[in-house]
Image (cartoon, helix red, strand yellow):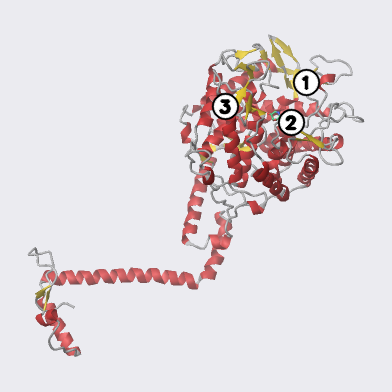
Amino acid sequence: MYSGAAAAAVGSPRRDFISVTLGPEEAAGVGGYNNSKAWRRRSCWRKWKQLSRLQRSVVLFLFAFLAVCGVISYTSMGETWKSITNKSLDDQRTEQEIPRLKLANPAVLPAPQKADANHGDYPELSLQKPPKPPHVRRGPSNLQIKAPRRDTRLKTRHDTMRAVEELVEADKVEKTEKSIISWRGAVIEPDQSTEPPSSKITELEKPSPVEPEDQKEPVPINERQLAVIEAFRHAWKGYKDFAWGHDELKPLSKSYSEWFGLGLTLIDALDTMWILGLKEEFEEARKWVANDLVFDKNVDVNLFESTIRILGGLLSTYHLSGDSLFLEKAKDIGNRLMPAFKTPSKIPYSDVNIGRGTAHPPRWTSDSTVAEVTSIQLEFRELSRLTGDEKFRKAVDEVMKHVHILSGKNDGLVPMFINTNSGQFTHLGVYTLGARADSYYEYLLKQWIQGGKKENELLEDYMRAIEGVKKHLLQRSEPKKLTFVGELAHGHFSAKMDHLVCFLPGTLALGAHNGLAADHMKLAETLIETCYQMYAQVETGLSPEIVHFNLHAQKGHKDVEIKPADRHNLLRPETVESLFYMYRFTGDKKYQDWGWEILQNFNRYTRVPTGGYTSINNVQNPSNPEPRDKMESFFLGETLKYMFLLFSDDIDLINLDKYVFNTEAHPLPIWVPG
Ligand code: DMJ
């Protein structure tokens, strides 16, 4: 209440300050008190008149200001009220909008828990931003950190805003996609090759912003997929009953074999179980990883094999499940493998003792295998991205850079050995796409894809190598004129082809899908036909480990000849792997049918009734294929996984624009620029 004469507020002479005075009685708090309405009105009016014009305007302005504020807050309260009273109506509308906006129930996993608890173990690691949580459609539900239910998710304005942002993002992606020429599932970016080289790999640090994978109704599992699940369960039963926690099942002797003593089959199979939706099996295996998987062991492991199977398997399972246990284990094994890189040339040794932290080459040589030292990159690069620790990536990148400039190649084709002291290729003059060189070519392309197609040296090496294959290694057989990939030894062509080479059609198709030359796809089509014939022309319908093609027509001879030493089958995945890529990119059902034949023949000749599948010694003898009593871990890690994916019509089941498979079929995310 303002009145009277006592200066209460501001005694400044400046005109733009208000000087308010209080009457002596009020100021003193004494005097008569008349509270009649008329008196109050009169008194107010008198006081109003006593104010200067400036004071009056200020007061009026304040009133006006307060009035405006009042109106605004009334409106917003009204909206809140309305939203409360219309809540159910609003909810219904939101529900109806969901399908239209394509935002329904995104299966957003919360960010995988960081491994804070273990910081003490790895003081040098500064954890990077956790990856954007992967979206999951399959897998044990109680291990998924579930998205809130749709109705609660979209209730708040914040969530709606987020949903709209996602929509805008999705729209952007869609627009980008529209500028791309595509055929069923295949993507060709016309100006890929014009992209400027970039060594700024640090830009590529974020995981792909994957679309929620469960937006659509899950595609129902079909009969062939069910047959794969049945096969997996049968194999798993044998492993569980007789080899639990060991490296490989010996299904006939109902026992196991150890290679590294690290539960190789179990780890290799983790993400397969996730993809096949085998909840119980996955949970049980997870428990074993949590309680029994120990890397602090005085044991020599092969760097390449443990990287692709163990590190790769743990990383992909981490991505699919969002469960930080697997990342912790991946970091542990990753760190323990690092001593392998301590060599004079930085080309890693083949073997590491993961308990002692020492590494060494094989006893008889100081050479490493070229495919081995150049096929560990996807895994270590991903480990660096997840942990923020560059040492993993630096170590493997250095190998690639070194090999990139190394002499001794033949039109991009590499020899099979490299010396860990000198860093030079050894045993020059022998070139193959099979054992000891195979995945060098595969990883050139796949690293380029993983890194967002920016590392041009990788692409150059890949393109040159494929030209080298065309120039030196391709031939056609008789009588069917199958195109095959042979070998070159000191200038002499050999019509020998390992089953391992059958990764190539899939890789070529993947390259074409990513914008590389269309003739790569043509070559892929002819080569996969050849790989299929390596099965179809054999008595059991299963391919041997190695075939020799006939270059000249001979009466009564097929294209494929098999030497006695080569007629075993180890349940390998390469042909099925390529069939999967071919089907994904072309939609041609014949690839599924071929895969189905192969699965049936595995069931016919390699299935052991008491559980498990076995490698066989003689693919040419259906009445006695001579079981070898061993189920390799890649049968569960790769062969059955690719079978299941081959029979699926759901291109989002491990979308090939979001994931790249390592050479052991463990999917790792493709990075997008941060
Ligand atoms: C697997 O370990 C990998 O696929 C590797 O690249 C080659 N050998 C086996 C499967 O045949």
Q: Position of residue 453 (x, y in %)?
A: 53, 31
Q: Position of residue 608 (x, y in %)?
A: 85, 38
Residue at image point 61% right, 20% down: 465
Residue bearing the label numbered 2: 575
Q: Relative to residue 149, is residue 537 depicted above or below?
A: above
Q: State the residue at coordinates (54%, 66%).
A: 91
Nearer to me, 470 or 640 = 640
- Separation (CA) of disc 2 from disc 3: 35 Å
- 181 left or right, relative to 602: left
The amino acid pointed to by label 3 is Pro
Mark 3 residue element? helix
- CB of residue at label 3: within 8 Å of ligand 1? no
Asked if the residue at tag 3 contacts the one at tag 2, i.e. Cβ–Cβ closer than 8 Å, the answer is no
Mark 2 or mark 1, which is nearer the start of the sequence? 1
Q: Of tags 2 and 3, which is closer to the observer? A: 3
- The amino acid type of the residue labelled 1 equals Lys
Q: Which residue: 9% across, 65% down?
A: 12
Q: Which residue is mark 1?
A: 481
Comes first in the chain, label 1 or label 3? 3
